[in-house]
């Protein structure tokens, strides 16, 4: 059976309070019982002393006892649950409570036994009697035997106190449980309501509605983190859904253009509108090459993003490699009227797959040429620090807007929505570049401002055990 978080929190508060009250009661009872017993024993000894002193004052100098005074003392002791017997120096009984009223004595013993067994069931009670000497000055004139049901003597006031104390413990327990239940309900509501709303948002996301957001504010750090995480998930999925739709449209566009061209040319030649000559066939052949190039790019991207990608690591001078590629592009840059500069030190060694790193450099330099107008500049530099090697390609081209900047590494993403081939290719080059860099456990970053230029930064780990 599954229990809701609200119920669990409420029950946990009640359980904690019950355990705390129980432990408090147990330790309080242990502490109180020990001190209460000491108090009873001290009180009992004090009563003994008072009775003995009172009996001693009933002795007259001529060796006589004031019988009425002793009887009053004995009756008063009976009312307090004590049975006394006064004996003179010749062992003659002066006054005996049992002789005075034996029925009352037996009833007192029975009542006291019931009280002790009720409040101290583990004690083995029995009738006990203590004898105390009575002095007149320094002369012993007799003795007093005081009996009660022991070992503890509980007066009516003691019983009333014990009952009141038990009521206090019970009242505290009931009140604590009520407070715990109320507080548990309030706290569980405060904790579970935001979570329930976040769950509703997550369920909407699971159904494909990515526009929903949770705006719950809570003083609990984890709930705020959960809300922010679910909102970020929704935003990411919504963005990915848009990219997926755009990817589908872009792939369809990339395939539709060469296929439509092939279809129109072939139909024209089949219908006899165009003559079957080398020029027409070459046009069809060019479209087929475009399709093959697109398929090759997709296959290459799938290979680079695969977990089973095999990299042929080797240690080589990346500065010399970049310089050689820059020299290879000089003719293309010169034809467009764009200046390219290289800045790098010799002997910057890196452990990587040389062919794939070459493709990264070629993609970035060709992109910089493609999006830099005549009269612009491109700076290519290689640097090295203790942990990483940095490759930077900075141009003064058309730049990338802030809205498009987060998506430039997505498949088929093109800033220029018309997908004009004059301004760019299929939109897979940067995706492949990022896949190669990440396969080397590196990072690629981009900084750009519209109409001011773009800078790509590639960071590759310097030291690897693979070489």
Image (tube, rainbow, N blue to C red):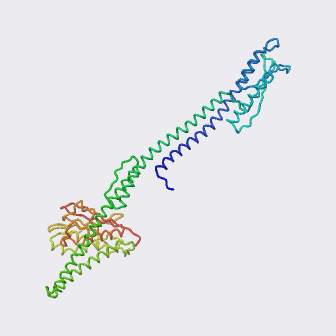
Which quadrant of the view contains residue 129?
Answer: top right
Residue 320: image x %, image y %? Answer: 28, 73
Quarter of the image with the C terminus in it: bottom left
Q: Which residue is farthest right?
A: 90
Which quadrant of the view contains residue 415?
Answer: bottom left
Residue 262: image x %, image y %? Answer: 20, 81
- Location of residue 198 with respect to 28 vertically, above or below: below
Residue drawn 37% across the image and 61% down it: 206
- Location of residue 193 with respect to 422 vertically, above or below: above
Residue drawn 77% across the image and 30% down it: 128
Q: Which residue is farthest front?
A: 103
Q: Is residue 355 visible?
A: no
Q: Which residue is farthest top?
A: 62
Horizontal arrangement in the rendering, residue 30 relative to residue 386 (left or right):
right
Q: Nearer the viewer, residue 233 or 434?
A: 233
What is the number of callouts on the image?
0
Which quadrant of the view contains residue 327?
Answer: bottom left
Q: Nearer the viewer, residue 434 or 175?
A: 175
Q: Nearer the viewer, residue 329 or 123?
A: 123
Residue 418: image x %, image y %? Answer: 19, 69
Horizontal arrangement in the rendering, residue 166 relative to residue 272 (left or right):
right
Horizontal arrangement in the rendering, residue 438 relative to residue 8 (left or right):
left
- Location of residue 215 with respect to 62 vertically, above or below: below
Q: Is residue 122 visible?
A: yes
- Location of residue 460 with respect to 288 vertically, above or below: above
């Amino acid at each position: 059976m599954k229990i809701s978080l609200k119920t669990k929190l409420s029950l946990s508060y009640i359980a904690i309070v019950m355990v705390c009250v129980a432990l408090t009661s147990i330790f309080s009872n242990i502490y109180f019982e020990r001190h209460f017993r000491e108090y009873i024993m001290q009180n009992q000894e004090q009563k003994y002393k008072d009775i003995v002193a009172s009996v001693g004052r009933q002795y007259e100098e001529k060796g006589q006892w004031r019988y009425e005074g002793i009887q009053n003392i004995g009756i008063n002791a009976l009312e307090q649950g004590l049975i006394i017997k006064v004996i003179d120096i010749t062992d003659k009984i002066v006054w005996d409570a049992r002789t005075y009223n034996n029925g009352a004595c037996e009833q007192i013993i029975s009542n006291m036994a019931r009280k002790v067994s009720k409040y101290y069931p583990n004690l083995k009670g029995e009738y006990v009697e203590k004898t105390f000497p009575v002095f007149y000055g320094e002369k012993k004139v007799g003795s007093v035997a005081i009996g009660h049901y022991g070992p503890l003597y509980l007066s009516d006031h003691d019983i009333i106190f014990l009952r009141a104390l038990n009521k206090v413990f019970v009242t505290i327990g009931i009140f604590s449980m009520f407070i715990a239940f109320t507080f548990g309900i309030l706290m569980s509501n405060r904790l579970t309501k935001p979570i329930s709303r976040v769950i509703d948002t997550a369920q909407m996301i699971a159904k494909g509605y990515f526009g929903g957001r949770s705006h719950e504010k809570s003083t609990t750090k984890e709930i705020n983190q959960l809300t922010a995480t679910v909102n970020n998930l929704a935003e990411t999925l919504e963005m990915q859904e848009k990219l997926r739709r755009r990817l589908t449209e872009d792939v369809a566009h990339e395939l539709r253009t060469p296929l439509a061209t092939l279809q129109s040319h072939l139909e024209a030649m089949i219908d006899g509108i165009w003559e079957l000559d080398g020029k027409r066939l070459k046009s069809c052949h060019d479209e087929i090459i475009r399709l093959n190039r697109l398929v090759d790019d997709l296959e290459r991207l799938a290979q680079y993003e695969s977990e089973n990608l095999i990299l042929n690591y080797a240690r080589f001078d990346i500065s010399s490699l970049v310089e050689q590629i820059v020299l290879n592009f000089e003719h293309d840059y010169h034809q467009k009227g764009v200046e390219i500069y290289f800045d790098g030190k010799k002997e910057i060694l890196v452990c990587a797959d040389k062919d794939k790193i070459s493709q990264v450099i070629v993609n970035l330099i060709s992109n910089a040429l493609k999006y830099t107008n005549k009269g612009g500049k491109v700076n290519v530099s290689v640097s090295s620090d203790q942990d990483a090697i940095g490759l930077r390609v900075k141009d003064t081209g058309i730049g990338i807007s802030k809205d498009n900047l987060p998506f430039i590494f997505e498949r088929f993403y093109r800033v220029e929505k018309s997908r004009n081939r004059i301004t760019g290719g299929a939109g897979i080059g940067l995706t492949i570049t990022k896949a190669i860099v990440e396969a080397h456990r590196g990072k690629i970053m981009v900084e750009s401002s519209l109409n001011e230029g773009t800078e790509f930064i590639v960071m590759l780990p310097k030291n690897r055990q693979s070489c």
